């Protein structure tokens, strides 16, 4: 009646003698690992640029207000990325987007004088929004 103890399901089988890790390594043929060369991401960049090229061609060909709206969309994406990088400086995002829209509309419907006027007028707006955002001194 005294037999080997029963092992629960999933338990390891007893190790065989003489087949340790060093022995297993010696039995395998020696293979050199190939060093992976850095892969070029040029094809991924070209594939990502194709829709951007199509969008740029579309807004340039259409011109007028569609061009202005397209440049605003691109500018808004660029400003969002820039403000993300300057997060510690707490940029006034609203002033940047208002300035971009104002400059583009002045360029679309006005002349050089109106563009300069908007560029100068955005400075007091930026100052006021900065004071409103900071909430007082620290």
Image (spheres, grey):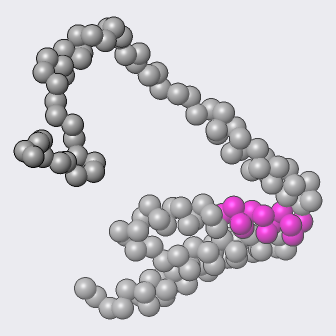
**Residue 135 image-quadrant placement:** bottom left
**Residue 123 image-quadrant placement:** bottom right
Q: How many marks?
A: 0
Task: Residue at 35% x, 11% y: name it.
Answer: 32
Q: Position of residue 30 (x, y in %)?
A: 32, 8
Q: In the rendered image of this protein, does residue 70 appear above or below residue 36?
A: below
Q: Quadrant of the C terminus?
A: bottom left
Q: Is residue 113 visible?
A: no
Q: Is residue 71 magenta?
A: yes
Task: Residue at 43% x, 87% y: name it.
Answer: 133
Task: Residue at 48% x, 77% y: name it.
Answer: 92
Q: Residue furthest right?
A: 62
Task: Residue at 57% x, 65% y: name it.
Answer: 79
What range of the chain is rendered magenta?
64-75
Query: Would residue 58 appear left or right of 8 to someone viewing this image?
Result: right
Q: Position of residue 38 (x, y in %)?
A: 47, 26
Q: In the rendered image of this protein, does residue 102 appear above or below residue 50?
A: below
Q: Residue furthest left?
A: 2
The foreground one among 33 and 134 is 33
Helix, strand or loop for the magenta stretch, by majority = helix
Q: Position of residue 40 (x, y in %)?
A: 56, 28
Query: Would residue 125 appear left or right of 89 to someone viewing this image?
Result: right
Q: Is residue 121 magenta?
A: no
Q: In the rendered image of this protein, does residue 47 appear above or below residue 71?
A: above
Q: Is residue 122 visible?
A: yes
**Residue 101 image-quadrant placement:** bottom right
Q: Residue furthest top?
A: 29
Q: Residue furthest front?
A: 1
Q: Position of residue 9 (x, y in %)?
A: 27, 51
Query: Would residue 62 appear left or right of 114 to someone viewing this image?
Result: right
Query: Would residue 62 appear left or right of 50 to someone viewing this image?
Result: right
């Amino acid at each position: 009646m005294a037999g080997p103890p029963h092992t629960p399901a999933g338990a390891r089988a007893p190790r065989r003698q003489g087949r340790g890790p060093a022995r297993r390594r010696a039995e395998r043929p020696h293979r050199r690992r190939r060093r992976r060369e850095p892969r070029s991401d040029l094809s991924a960049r070209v594939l990502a640029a194709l829709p951007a090229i199509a969008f740029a061609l579309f807004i340039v060909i259409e011109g007028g207000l569609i061009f202005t709206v397209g440049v605003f969309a691109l500018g808004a994406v660029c400003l969002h990325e820039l403000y993300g990088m300057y997060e510690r400086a707490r940029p006034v995002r609203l002033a940047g987007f208002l300035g971009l829209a104002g400059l583009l509309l002045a360029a679309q419907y006005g002349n050089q004088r109106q563009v300069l006027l908007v560029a100068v007028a955005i400075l007091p707006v930026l100052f006021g929004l900065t004071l409103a955002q900071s909430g007082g001194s620290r």
